[in-house]
Amino acid sequence: MGGKRILIADDNKQIRMLVSATLRAGGYELIEAADGAEALEMAVSERPDLVLLDVMMPNLDGFEVLHFLRKRPECAGCKVVMLTTAASMADMQRGAKEGADGYVVKPFQPADLKSVVANVLAAQ
């Protein structure tokens, strides 16, 4: 599975560092965005295989980013996993409705995150 590019979009630097540390051993190329607008811009320009997307971010929230990504033809093949504390059934349903490929609730277990990432990428 190595060699796949993953964009980690979260406004919390510690979360980005934790996710990077969790996934680094998988051989993934990891890039980071600190807010929703930067995440959208990087997803369009870098064309990652997967975006790990927080919901609660400044400028654009994760659902808005997901909505825009699903409308961009250059991002058609990009998988998106919501990685967030927004854990209500309504949040999860909204993520699914907007086209998320997976949903991981923070705080997460590293093994669970690795598993979800591997499974979503394997479905490409």
Image (spheres, rainbow, N blue to C red):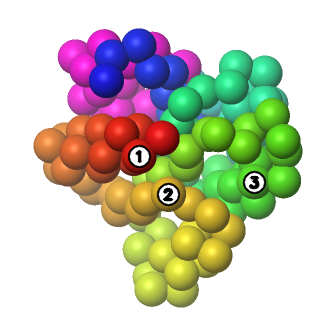
Say above or below: 6 vs 96.
above
The residue lying at 42 percent from left, 61 percent from top is 103
Q: Which residue is mark 3?
A: 70
Q: Earlier in the sequence, mark 2 or mark 1?
A: 2
The residue lying at 25 percent from left, 29 percent from top is 22
Q: Quadrant of residue 63?
A: bottom right
The reply to whether discs 2 and 1 touch (Cβ–Cβ < 8 Å) is: yes
Element under disc 3: helix
Q: Where the N terminus falls, by quadrant?
A: top left
Left or right of residue 110: residue 40? right
The residue lying at 78 percent from left, 21 percent from top is 45
Q: Earlier in the sequence, mark 1 or mark 3?
A: 3
Whole-percent x and y of residue 31? 54, 20
Amino acid at the residue labelled 1 = Ala
Left or right of residue 48: residue 13? left
Our reading of the magenta stretch's main secondary structure is helix
Element under disc 1: loop
Q: For residue 22: magenta?
A: yes
Give the spatial CA distance, label 2 vs label 1. 10 Å
Give the spatial CA distance, label 2 vs label 3. 11 Å
Q: Which residue is mark 2?
A: 101
Specify the segment rendered in magenta. 13-31
